[in-house]
Image (spheres, helix red, strand yellow):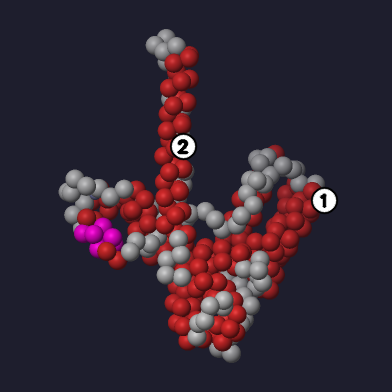
Amino acid sequence: MSPEHPTFDVLKLYSLDQLDQREKVRLEGHLSTCSECRRRVSSLAGTTESTAVAQCRRLFLRAAAHHPETRLADSLRARVLTPTEESWKRLGLPVPNLPASQWTPNQRTAKESWDCQHIKLLHEWAEDLNLQYDWVISEAAAQLTIWRSMPGVKGAFTGILGYEPPLFYIEAWHFEDELERRYRKRMKAKFASALQAHVRDVKRLRSRLLADRGSQNSHYRWAVEYVCLKWKWSDIARENGTHVTWQAVSKAVRPILAKIGIPESTT
Ligand SMILES: [Zn+2]
C-alpha cells in the first residue's frame, strides 16, 4: 500500500468523473494497489458511472434554471410549489412533521388528493419544458422538498451530489471528571473544527465543479435550448454571443444528450 493516500476531495472528484486525464491515471495507479482507497471510492454515492450521469443531469437542470427563456426553477415554484402550499392549507393538513400516526382519517384522505394534485402539476410542468423524464420529476420533487423544509434556500439544483455534511456527535459529559466550562469549551472547539473542514472541502469541490472546463457551461446552455426550447442547431449557433458553427453546436450537445439520456429529436 502506498503511504500517500489521495485526499477525500480527489476521490470525490474521481467519483464524479471530474478529474483531468493525468490526475485520473495517477489515481487509478494508486487504487490498483490500495484496497483502503478502493473501499472509500466505492462508498462515495454509488458507482462512478451513475454518479457522473447524475451530476451531468444536475448541471443540465442548473443551466435550465439560469436560462432566461426557460427559468426552470422559477416556473417550478410558480406552477407547483405555490399552488400545492395553498392547497395544503385549504385542505386543513397538519404541520408536515407531525407523525402520520397522529393524523385523523380525514386528513389522510385529504393528503391522498393532495399527492395526486402534486404529481399532476409536476408532470404538467415537465411536459411544457419537453422534460417528461423520470429523473427530471424526481430531481424536481427533491428540490421542492428542500424548498419546503428550508424556506431560506433560493437557488435550485445547487447541491454537490453525494456530498453529505459530516455527522457531529456531542460526547457524553462525565461531570465528575470534567468541569462544565471545560466540557463546553471542548465540544465547541470540536464542532468549530468539523464545520471548518466541511466548508473548506465544499469550497474546493465547488471551484472544481463549477469552473468552466472547456466551455462546459455554454454546452449545457445549448443543450437546454435544443431540448426545452426546441431550437435547431442553426438557431442555437446564431443566438450564441461569439461565432460558432451549427456543426460545432451539434458536436458539443450530442454527447451531453447521450449521457443524460435524452434522445435527439427526429424532426
Ligand atoms: Zn490509498
Q: Residue at x 70, y 70 (%)?
A: 124
The location of residue 186, given as percent across then percent down, is 43, 22
> How many circles with numbers are drawn on the protein?
2
Q: Is residue 255 left or right of residue 64?
A: left
- Most extreme residue toward the front is 242
Q: Any mark on residue 90, and which?
A: 1
Which x, y percent locates residue 134? 56, 68
Would residue 121 appear left or right of 221 to someone viewing this image? Answer: right
Give the overall secondary structure of the magenta segment: helix
- Residue at 42% x, 50% y is 204
Front tag of 2 and 1: 2
Q: Is residue 115 above or below residue 98?
A: below
Q: Is residue 227 visible?
A: no
Residue 261, x across and y down, in percent: 49, 74
Q: Is residue 225 above or below residue 29?
A: below
Check disc 2 and report its element: helix, strand or loop: helix
Badge 1 density bin: few <14, some 14–19, many ≥20, Cα 10 Å? few
* Secondary structure state at the residue bearing disc 1: helix
As drawn, which residue projects farthest toward the right?
90
- Viewer-closest of 175 and 223: 223
For the point 44% across and 27% down, the residue is 189
Q: Which amino acid type is marked by label 1?
A: Arg
| CB of mark 2 near ligand 1 (< 8 Å) | no
Outermost residue toward the top in this view: 176
Q: Nearer the viewer, residue 140 or 230?
A: 230
Residue at 27%, 64% in the rendered image: 22
Q: Which residues are magenta?
A: 23-29
| Residue bearing mark 2 | 195
Would the CB of label 1 be found within 8 Å of ligand 1? Answer: no
Lower position in the chain sequence, tag 2 or tag 1: 1
